[in-house]
Amino acid sequence: MTGTKRSNAQRLRDSLENDIINGRRVPGERLDPEALGREFQVSRTPVREAFQQLVASGLVTVSPKKGTFVAKVGIDQLIEMFEVMAELEGMCGRLAARRITESELAALREAHQRCEAAAMAGDSDEYYYENEGFHDCIYTASHNAFLASEARQLKQRLKPYRRLQLQVRQRVNNSLSEHQTIVEAIERGDPVAAQQALSDHVLIQGERFSDFVSSVRRMEAPLERTG
């Protein structure tokens, strides 16, 4: 995605994601579509599309006749979702190590290189997008359409929180190193190592768990202070 212009809906969604995960918009806050349209100088359509994407990720909720609101984050549910995501990613990695084609392997290597370029540039937002492409290559290489669909659907729900993880200090560099381990396991056709590497890459555990909970708590703090 380097060098491409993002759509108005994506630009608005990204801005709202950043505001929510950094606590500038608090759980329960109403999102005014007309005010956002004026602020970002866009029509109703991009605002509606951005809202739909944020609803899909679980960051906002729509209440009939009341409006669109920032959703309250549930730590327990998020952790459970990441646990399932780790299993799905691991399965994709295991199958990819057995089934990946030469052209798909080349695409995976290129995706890894784009992640590396974004990391070297210190651009966590660009890394976030290239990281999505990297994982999508693995879903495709699993050659299991149902599994890939389920993984993509849950990934969509977790996008903002995966993005939040990348804002933790050194997480981008660590993520890139984990990507290298994943690529090497798939290259040598080692399904066990690929599955473990993908699962460990996604699963929130140890110090990453503490960092993640701390980050999400910061999202909730403004509401607690004003409530």
Image (cartoon, helix red, strand yellow):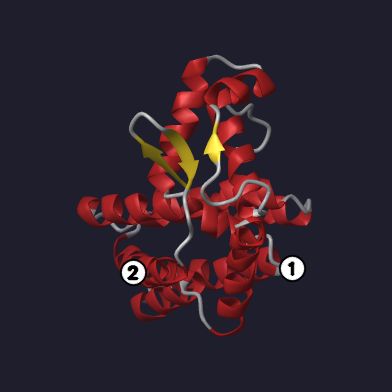
Left-right relation of 121 to 137: right
Q: Is residue 76 above or below residue 148?
A: below
Quadrant where the N terminus is found in the figure:
top right
Please say if 183 is above or below 121. Answer: below
Residue bearing mark 1: 169
Element under disc 2: helix
Say which residue appears at 61% left-offset and 83% top-offset. Answer: 207
| Residue closer to the observer: 18 or 69 | 69
Can you tell which quarter of the image residue 80 is in? bottom left
Q: Quadrant of the C terminus?
A: bottom right
The tag earlier along the polypeptide, 2 or 1, is 2
Residues at badges 2 and 1 in contact (C-beta under 8 Å)?
Answer: no
Front position in the image: 28 or 219? 28
Real-space Cα separation, disc 2 to disc 1, in angstroms = 25 Å
Q: Which mark is residue 84?
A: 2
Drawn side of residue 208 relative to residue 149, left or right: right
- Horizontal side of residue 226 vs 102, given as left or right: right
Q: Residues within 10 Å of mark 1 (few under 14, many from 20)?
A: few
Report the residue that reaches farthest toward the front.
Answer: 227
The residue that appears at 49% across and 32% down in the rendered structure is 50
Residue 117 place in picture, x, y as percent: 71, 51
Q: SS for tag 1? A: loop
Q: Residues within 10 Å of mark 2 (few under 14, many from 20)?
A: some
Nearest the eye: 211 or 118: 211
- The kind of residue on which mark 1 rests is Arg
